[in-house]
Amino acid sequence: MTGGAEHCSFVLLADFDIDRGAQLTYQFPQPLGTDETLLANLMLPDGAERQPEDWTIFFLNQRPFNTIAPVLALEPSESHGGEADGRNEDKSQELIYVLNLVRTKLDKTVRRGAIVKAMAICTRHSFIEIFKPVLLMALDDYFMNPSQDCLARLFDAVNSMDISMAPVLSRFERLIMRTSERKDVFLEKFEELSRPAGSEPPVHNPTHKTEGSVGSQSSFEEGILMRGQPKGRDRDSVKNATASATSLPSTNQHSPSDGSFSLDGSAVWVENGHDQSMSQAGTNASSTAVGTNRSTSLRGRKSMDASSSASSHNHGRRDEAGAIPALTTTNPPLLKDTHFFPATIEYNDHQLPIRLPMCTFQEEVGDYSLIQLVQTFSAPSTTITGPIHPHLHTSGNQTHPIIILFNALVTGKRIIFLGHHRPAGQVSSYVLSACALGSGCGIVPRGLIKRAFPYANLINKEEWESTPAYIAGVTNPIFEASASWDLLCDIGTSRMVISKDIHQNHPAGMPANPVQLIVRSGTVKAEGSLGSEEEMSRPSKDLNPVQKAEFVGKVETADNIFMEDIISAISLHYGEAHVRARFTEYATRFVRLAARFEEDVLGINTTIGYPGVSYIESSGEEPRLGSGLCFTDEAAGVRELAANASRIEAWRRTESYELWQQDFNKLKNTNPIQGVDIAHQLWKLRHSKRMSEGEASLIYRTLAENTQTYDQVTELLSLLPPHHNGLLPLSFGLFHQQEMVREYTVEIFNELRSYSVGVQFLQALNHFQRYAYVRQAHVRESRLARDHNTLTIPPSYMSRTPSNRSESSLAGG
C-alpha cells in the first residue's frame, strides 16, 4: 500500500426534486460516463424520505449497464493486500465500491416538507466503512453551503490520507491475525509507526560474531552470561562459566513460569517479570530457556548468521542471543490494536481518526455481520416454504436455513433479500453478509461480490435480473411477486421462500448412489471443526436400533452439527471474528470435500485440492505422507459424500468453481511449503487414534524440514488457530515414545520461538506442555554444547591448574 494511492476515485451528489424525481447534481472530479438516472436512484433509495438517515452500498464496473467510462483515465490505486492474496486482477475492470449517505431534513418552506440529499464516495478499497465519519461531515457541510466546493474538499481530504506506513501483510499473516485476539500480533510490522518522532531507525547489528570453531556453538550461552557480567570480563572465563553451567544437574533448574516466554527477548528464566540475577550463573545457567540457537540441529542445519538475523528483523526474529527487538515489548501509544492501522483524515480543520483494517480480503466489503445473519434466520419464527431441492437441502427437510442460503450461494441460485419498510442500508448489510458466507469470508471461493447488488430497484430491474446467479437487496415488495428469483429471504419476517419453479429452472440431475461411492475412509466430522469424536460415536452406543435410525435422520449430519455449534457460540457471546473463522473453515471443508468427491465418485484427478491418498509405508520404498480430506468413520463418509453429491455437482458448473480452480493452483505453486498437505497432517495429529510410529515420525520430520523460513512458519501457524487450541496437535510430539519425534518437535518449537508471532503461540500452551518443551529443549542444548566442548579442547588446556581442570572436566561431561 502506497501513500500516494488514490483512495477516492469520485464524489457524487444527488438531490430529490418533487417534479423531476431523483437527480444527479454533481460528479467530481469528472463525469463517470454511465447512466445518471441510474446513479441518482441508487443514491436515493425507495422510502428514503421516511428515514432521517440511511446508508446504502452499490458497485460499479460489474456489468455493462453500470461500467464507468471517464473521459480522463484515472490511475487505479493498488488494492489493499491484493497482490499478497495472490489474486491479481485487471485494474481497469476492478470493482468500484460506492458508499452512499442519504439524509432527510424536515423543512416546512419546501413543497414536500423535507429536503432529501445524498452524497457518495467511490473507492477501490473494499473496507469502505472507514469513510463514514468524513462523509457525515461533508454532507452536513453541503447542507449548509450547497456547492461543488464541498465535493472537492471531501475528495482532497480522503486522498490526502497517508497510509504509506501501513504494512502489507501476506495471505497467511492475515489469516493468523483475523483469528488472534491479541492486540499486539505482528507488532514488529509497525516498526516505522512505533518509532518516536525524530528518532533514527534502529540499526540491527548482529549481537555476536563467529570466532573459530567455538563461536557459533557457544554464542547462545555466551550472550546470556554476558548480559550480567562486567564489560571487562575475559572471553575465556565466560566460556569456562558457560561450560560449567551446561554440565550442572537438572535438579538445579527453576520451575517454569509464564514469564519464560515473555517478549522481552530474554532467554533466561523470568521470575515475577524480572530476570534472575546473573550472579547465580552457576545455578541458573542450566535453566537457560529454550534454545533459540540454531547452530546445530538434528539434520545439521547451519546456524543463523549475522545476515539472516539482520535480514529478518522485520519479522520479529530473535538474534543469536535470543533477543527480540525492544519494539515487541510494549504497544506504542498510537497503536492500540494491530488489527487496525491508525490514520487520520483532515477535513475542515478537523482531525478524524481512521482505523484501517489490516486482515480483510477482497470479497469482504463493508462492516458486515454474520452473527446478525445467523440470528435473523435462526429465530423461532423462521419458516421455510417451497419445494425441497437436492442442491439446497443437503439434510432433507431438516436443513438449516443458513445452510440452505450457503448452498444457494455456491450453486449459483438467484437470491433476493427483501426488507419491506426497512432501511436500504440494513438490506445492503444482509447482502454483503451473504457474500461473505458463501465465500468463506473472502478466503475460499470468490466471485460472489461481482454478482451482488446490495441495493437494487425497479429502475434497472431488467439489467440486474439478467445477471446469472445474482444476489440482490430490495425494499419494494413487488419483487416477491416476480418469478425471477430462486430463493427469497425476508429479513422482516425471518422467512425463506424457495421458488416453486426451482426444479424447472435448475434440474437436479441424477443423485449419486451411496453404493457406488468409492471411499477410502469416511466420517461426518473432518478438519476438527464439527465436534468431538466422542460426540459422533455417542448415539451408536447409547440408543436402541430404532432411536439410532431417528438420530441419523435428524441429528447426525455434518451441517446440523456445525450450525448447532455456531448458534451455541453466539449464545455464549463469542465475537464476530470467531463466527467468521468457523464459516471460513466450513467453506474450506466444502471445497476439500468436493475434491475428494471428484476423485472417489467421478474418478478424475482433482484440480481443486490435494489428492486423497493415505499414508504408505512399504518395504523397499520411501514412505509417503497422505493428503486430502480425512475421515474417521467410513460409513459416515459415504453418507456425507452422497448427501453433498448434488450441491457439489451444481457448484462444479458455476464460475465460482473455475475461479477457485485457478486460485488453488496458484496457491499450490506459490505457497512457502511445497508438496505437503499441511492441513491433512495436522488433522491426523488431532484425531488419529492409532497412528503408526513411522507415520508420526515422518509427519514431524516433514514439518521440521518445512519450517525453516518465516513464510513457512506463518503458513503453518495459519492452520493452527487459537480456537482449535493452537499448537496443541504439535505438542503431542513432546510426549511421544520415540526420541526422534520428540527431537523433531523441539526443533519445530525452537524455530517458532525465533519469531515473535511464534512466541505468542508458544505462550498459549499450558504449563504442562510448556515445561515439557523447555525441559527437553534445555537437555538438547546442553547435550549439543557438551558434545562440542568435548571435541574442541585445545592442547594447552591440560596444563592449567588442577582446579581449572576439575571445573573443565564437568564441562566435558
Image (cartoon, rainbow, N blue to C red):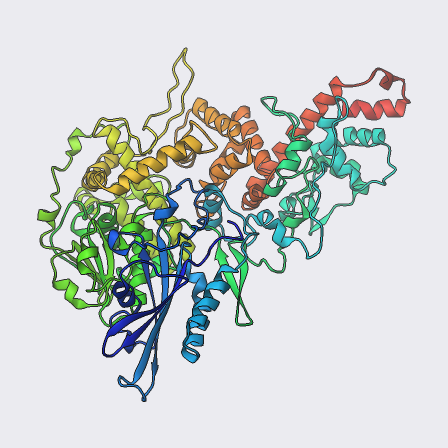
Quadrant of the rendered structure where residue 660 is? top left
Quadrant of the rendered structure where residue 763 is? top right
Residue situated in front as seen by the camera: 357 or 718: 357
Q: Is residue 676 left or right of residue 733?
A: left
In the rendered view, would you say 675 is above or below 461? above
Q: Position of residue 691 (x, y in %)?
A: 41, 27
Outermost residue on the front side: it is 71
Quadrant of the rendered structure where residue 591 is? top left
Q: Is residue 381 left or right of residue 203?
A: left
Give the total of numbered labels. 0
- Does residue 680 appear anywhere in the picture? no
Residue situated in front as seen by the camera: 275 or 266: 266
Q: Quadrant of the C terminus?
A: top right
Q: Position of residue 165 (x, y in %)?
A: 57, 52
Outermost residue on the top side: it is 620
Which residue is located at x 17 percent, y 67 percent? 477
In the rendered view, would you say 808 is above or below 133? above
Q: Position of residue 310 (x, y in %)?
A: 66, 37
Residue situated in front as seen by the camera: 450 or 322: 450
Outermost residue on the bottom side: it is 109
- Does residue 690 appear anywhere in the picture? yes
Q: Is residue 566 left or right of residue 255?
A: left
Q: Position of residue 225 (x, y in %)?
A: 78, 37
Which residue is located at x 59 percent, y 50 percent? 190
Q: Is residue 576 left or right of residue 110?
A: right
In the rendered view, would you say 3 is above or below 212? below
Residue situated in front as seen by the camera: 30 or 88: 30
